[in-house]
Amino acid sequence: GQQVMQIPQYQHVQEGEDFTTYCNSSTTLSNIQWYKQRPGGHPVFLIQLVKSGEVKKQKRLTFQFGEAKKNSSLHITATQTTDVGTYFCARREYGNKLVFGAGTILRVKS
Amino acid sequence: DAGVIQSPRHEVTEMGQEVTLRCKPISGHNSLFWYRQTMMRGLELLIYFNNNVPIDDSGMPEDRFSAKMPNASFSTLKIQPSEPRDSAVYFCASNNPISSGNTIYFGEGSWLTVV
């Protein structure tokens, strides 16, 4: 299946700064999921986006799905040290099979 | 709910030895996934079961890897013989589209080191 490309690979921000990770596909996505993995932990589901142009918010996290359904972004406002981890986007295929992007590692300096 | 339970959490073994990883999915979940995570290759789906039947094993690296799901509450991933390149974190995950929608729940992983 087609991979989803994530950028950047790594970002180191000062606490309080904003952070954004992007997920891109060369083909139209039926949906996109986002997961967070803390250091030493396991991936935890954050959200799924399905509709073109969809925007969803979870406190300081804002998720967007592009109009063409070929890209998605996760934006964190005013990062905190609890936000550290790796953020993955994933494309869901048949039967809930997930194909993950490479992830963006976020480090926050306090 | 106890979540997805994996064992062992950590294993160090010598090259050539057999390794068996175990997973108990969340009760009522009928889909089970085995993922492998490494720095180089990220999160890779190895095999996926639905109602205890393997649906897609295209991600299984080679014949040294095998997976079984004898019943709805138990699955194993076996590596025989193990090699140093098999060192990785192996995650089991489960889901039931009816009860949990699109959310896939991961276990805490089995950290395997082959020396």
Image (spheres, rainbow, N blue to C red):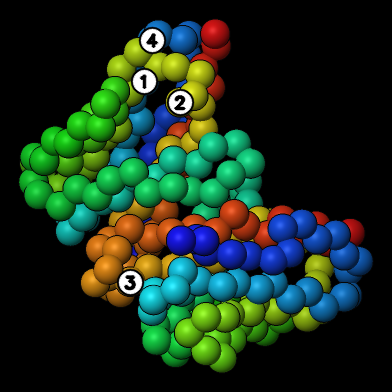
What distance separates the C-alpha of mark 4 from that of mark 2? 11 Å
Looking at the image, is mark 4 or mark 2 nearer the viewer? 2
Amino acid type at image mark 3: Asn
Q: Label 4, on which residue?
A: A17
Q: Label 1, on which residue?
A: A19
What distance separates the C-alpha of mark 3 from that of mark 4? 38 Å
What distance separates the C-alpha of mark 2 from that of mark 3? 28 Å
**Which of the chains bears the disc numbered 4?**
A
- Quarter of the image with the C terminus of chain B in it: bottom right
What distance separates the C-alpha of mark 1 from that of mark 2? 10 Å
Q: Quadrant of residue A35?
A: top left
Q: Residue furthest front?
A: B1
Secondary element type, mark 2: helix
Secondary element type, mark 3: loop
Q: Do the dots labelled 4 and 2 sit on one chain?
A: yes
Q: Do the dots labelled 3 and 1 sit on one chain?
A: no
- Within 10 Å of the Cα at label 2, are there few (<14), some (14-19), or many (20+) other Cα atoms? some
What distance separates the C-alpha of mark 3 from that of mark 1? 33 Å
**Which of the chains bears the disc numbered 3?**
B
Q: Label 2, on which residue?
A: A83
